[in-house]
Image (cartoon, grey):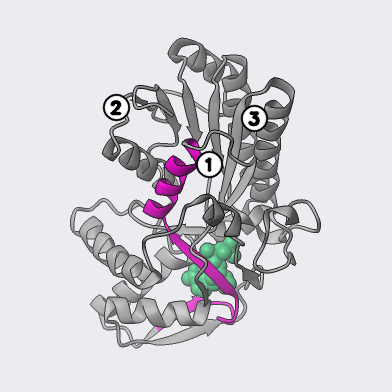
Amino acid sequence: MKKTDKIFVAGHRGMVGSAVVRALVREGYANVVTRTHAELDLLDPCAVRAFYETERPDVAVIAAARVGGIGANSAANALFLYENEMIALNTVWAAAEAGVKRLLFLGSTCIYPRLAPQPIPEEALLTGELEKTNEGYALAKISGLKLCEFLRRDRGLCYHSLMPTNLYGPGDNYDLVGGHVLPTMVRKFEEARVRGDATVPLWGTGSPLREFLHVDDLAAACLFVLNLDNPPDLLNVGSGEEVSIRDLAEQVRAATGCPATIDWDVTKPDGTPRKLCDTSRIRALGWKPAISLAEGLARTVSDYRTECAEHRVRMGHR
Ligand code: GDP
């Protein structure tokens, strides 16, 4: 990727897209193209096609998606399937039709089977049943990454994908019902501290294992793979640090300085029991994360307090 390339980042207002734009600008890529939702509806194939034909970017990074935690996904699998499928097919297919030479598609490690071997290697794709709580989202992301793979094979376009583990960072969604576990915990503990609550309600048993990656590490990984001449079709990206939900809760409690005790609501779902991705492939190519969970949590609590003070905490979907 050249510094003068015109780079389209789809989803630049989201947590991932905004981190990618920050990283591109910091690294001196001056020609970044973005569109707000109001300017370009990614669910509309004609609008997306017209956009690519007018703008003719050299590179596209597809970071747009409807995302949410276990609550949002399990309550609306149809919506998560439909919107993410349309976004993936429109943004990838129309890019190919308009002659975009390079494209990076972003997914998630929830594309892998629920009971995949751990840590999950890229080869586990499509070897078993998906996790039911986010099956719609996963199916849409599998379509997107397969479309990239097929276009690369059929037309020689360098379209490839990154599957990040659970992400967190600035601009995250702090919705108590629809958000992912880490930002939700930050908000719950911080609000309990401020209000002086004795307990904090959390979901499930606390036993599932998860891995978390700071979004600035993901953005660095995006630039890294975009600068590979012949990247693999699919690469996992994660921190390699595994933590139980219970341990995470203790760490978030400490990071916020909240003295409350935790009340586990076991009527809420645990989701997939373990989700650690095998990142040996991207590490062998030369990438590694720079932000530990401890440092990332400290930064996130501080970012959240700033976002609160400036009344710009994101809750729910834009
Ligand atoms: P997942 O990683 O795709 O399953 O989605 P999440 O990021 O929402 O993480 C869900 C895991 O965290 C499950 O094991 C939940 O039971 C657990 N969890 C504990 N408390 C909460 C909470 O307040 N919100 C969410 N979303 N998950 C929670």
Residue 193 on image: x %, y %: 27, 79
Of marks 2 and 3, the one in the foreground = 2
Residue count near mark 3 (Cα–Cα under 10 Å), binned few <14, some 14–19, many ≥20: many
Tell me the residue that label 2 is attached to.
30
Q: Is residue 44 above or below residue 223?
A: above
Tell me the residue that label 3 is attached to.
89
Front-lying residue, 131 or 298: 298
User: Where ligand 1 lies, by image quadrant?
Assistant: bottom right
Alpha-carbon span between mark 3 and mark 1: 12 Å
Q: Is residue 112 above or below residue 78?
A: below
Tell me the residue that label 1 is attached to.
65
Q: Is residue 59 above or below residue 205?
A: above
**What SS does tag 1 mark?**
loop
**What SS does tag 3 mark?**
helix
- 201 drawn magenta: yes
Which tag, 3 or 1, sits closer to the chain's start?
A: 1
Q: The magenta stretch spans which residues?
A: 200-226
Of marks 1 and 2, the one in the foreground = 2
Among the 4 quarters of the image, the one containing residue 22 = top left
Alpha-carbon span between mark 2 and mark 3: 27 Å
Name which residue type carries label 3: Leu
- 8 drawn magenta: no
